[in-house]
Image (cartoon, rainbow, N blue to C red):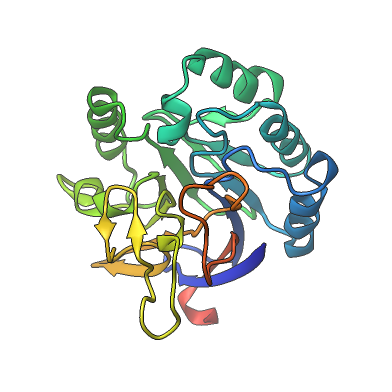
Amino acid sequence: MQTVHYTVTADKLTEPVRIVFISDLHSCRYGKGQSSIMKAIDDEKPDAVLFGGDLIDHMGDLKDACDLLKQVKEKYPCAYTPGNHELMRNDLSRVYSMVSDEAGVTILLGNSIDLGVKDQDIRVYGIIDAWEYGDHGTQLDNCRDSLDRDRYNILLAHQPEQIDEYLSDGGDFDLVLSGHAHGGQWRIPGILEQGLFAPDQGLFPKRTSGVFYEGSTVQVVSRGLSRPVRMAVIPRFFNRPELSVIDLVPADEK
């Protein structure tokens, strides 16, 4: 696991805010009770932790994800939105119950929460993965229609390649956080910087990790935390699992 830092200028903020973004864990375990992930999170001293989908694999057990969610909720403001692998399960209602009832974490499905950290006006929206096409579009409309452009608006949206859809029709989000692409699986430094293959992007993908700029919107795409033991069909190559740390910095402090 590699902790990767991103710095994003946030003109609407007056104080720096640090967010840990977790995506694509796929039911993997990092130490007993997810102790390795929790140590990595705690070492970064975040103001909030956001979960961007595929925390649970479509065939994985819920326990490891629940262990992580509970511990994060005890320490930090947090929110969760599902990815395609949660939606592929036949027990999605059980997943939602585990997240919201057992772990106490807010699920974002076309709605939003205010983070309430450091007296900053930060609102986090989330939408269901495009696996659920009807709900996906409706939820995105709800988010766009309720945008307060005086706030700093973050969208959790699992699939990075759909950025044009997220920003269409008045989707003026300041920051979009995505995963899904697993860093392109096989990477060759200097040659395949975005990897060889990504779900829904195919061969030689263009948007699998890092920072992308779309007008006034910044998108951060995490390589995710899945490990080869889970993603056995296409293992990682020069592509370490990633814990993403995003520092939102006022313009006069960058």
Instruction: Please tell me whether residue 220 is drawn above or below residue 25 in the rendered image.
Output: below
Seen in the image, is 133 located left or right of residue 45? left
Residue 82 lies, in percent from the top left, at: 46, 33
Seen in the image, is 237 located left or right of residue 83? right
Q: Which one is nearer the viewer's eye here, 206 or 239?
A: 239
Residue 189 lies, in percent from the top left, at: 45, 82
Q: Which one is nearer the viewer's eye here, 97 or 126?
A: 97
- The residue under the point 40% across, 54% down is 181
Residue 164 lies, in percent from the top left, at: 20, 53
Seen in the image, is 148 located left or right of residue 49? left
Residue 67 placement: quadrant: top right
Instruction: Please tell me whether residue 20 is drawn above or below residue 78 in the rendered image.
Output: below
* Quadrant into which the N terminus falls: bottom right
Residue 182 lies, in percent from the top left, at: 46, 55
Seen in the image, is 71 located left or right of residue 112? right
- The residue under the point 60% across, 30% down is 60
Q: Residue at the left extreme?
A: 169
Count of residue discs:
0
Q: Which one is nearer the viewer's eye here, 39 or 121?
A: 39
